[in-house]
Amino acid sequence: MSELLEIGVVYRITNLDNSNFYIGSTLNLNSRIKRHLRELKQNKHHNFILQGDYNLVDKFNYKLDILDKSVKFKEIEQRYLDKCIDKNKCYNISRHSTCGDLISYHPKRNKIVDKITKGLNKQYKEGRKHITKKGFGNPNWKGGISISKCKCGKKIKGTAKFCKKCYFKQRNTLGKNNPFYGKKHSEETIEKLKKKEPNYYPPNSKKIRIEDKIYNSYKEAERKLDIKAPTIRHRCLSKNEKYKNYKIIE
């Protein structure tokens, strides 16, 4: 599986309305493209130039090209960026495939640098010593973490008055004082709990198909097939013909 994950994809998204393009690389192309489109739709995309062009049209017409597939996908992406980063058609702000510097070649570089400079000058003008002190003058200080001791001598943090053991003692709900002491759930309640748990699936669960049967998540398949979830995921991602009947439903 590690060998499979090492092979990355270098891709290009071209805006068909103006021929501008964005170059990127990823280990999971489907997931990355979905993320781009989701962030553009939510107006939260990290590339504000691409976001601006997206906001100008009712429907975003784009073309996806796979430029290369390789273990050295970051190096290949860098070569593509070196060729076209200076051209006006390229959306990419950073000149590096690993991101890093996002200011040097930013279209609004001067505005960003001025804002940072003014902020630093203001701090030094007012005096930086009191800002770095704990408490006074520090806008991020929330009272600090105090360490005190419980009556039993155990260290406790924050605003707690008791350690965990003493907390339950003072509540007086241990043993016979617990309202559920000596009781058991009825068979009906147990069955309800059993039915409720399997029917809940987190929003990021992936449906999978195994031998023409559909499962709502890896965990559901694990329970019914008695195969560990990581093993099922490995087989779904594997290119081995042996596991061709294990598929992720997009």
Image: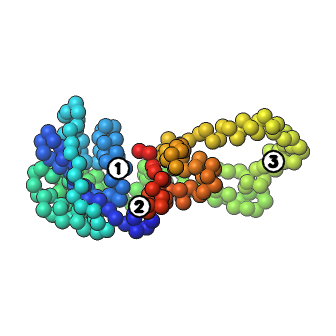
Amino acid type, callout 2: Lys
Residue closest to the eye, 203 or 64: 64
Q: Earlier in the sequence, mark 2 or mark 1?
A: 1
- Residue drawn at x 50%, y 41% is 203
Q: Is residue 34 visible?
A: yes
- What number is the disc on residue 170? 3
Residue closest to the eye, 168 or 34: 34
Amino acid type, callout 1: Asn
Q: What is the distance, in whole Å, between disc 2 and disc 1 at their CAs?
A: 17 Å
- Residue drawn at x 77%, y 35% is 189
Residue closest to the eye, 120 or 233: 233
Residue closest to the eye, 124 or 237: 237
Q: Exactly how many numbered labels are in the figure?
A: 3
Q: Which residue is mark 2?
A: 239
- Residue drawn at x 53%, y 56% is 232
Q: Which residue is mark 1?
A: 30
Q: Is residue 160 left or right of residue 115?
A: right
Secondary structure category for the residue under label 1: helix
Percent x, y for residue 170?
81, 47
Percent x, y for residue 249?
44, 45
Q: Quadrant of the N terminus?
A: bottom left
Secondary structure category for the residue under label 2: loop
Task: Check contact, mark 3 vs mark 1: CB within 8 A.
Answer: no
Q: Earlier in the sequence, mark 3 or mark 2?
A: 3
Residue farthest toward the top in the current orientation of the protein: 58
Amino acid type, callout 3: Gln
Q: Quadrant of residue 57?
A: top left
Percent x, y for residue 87?
10, 55
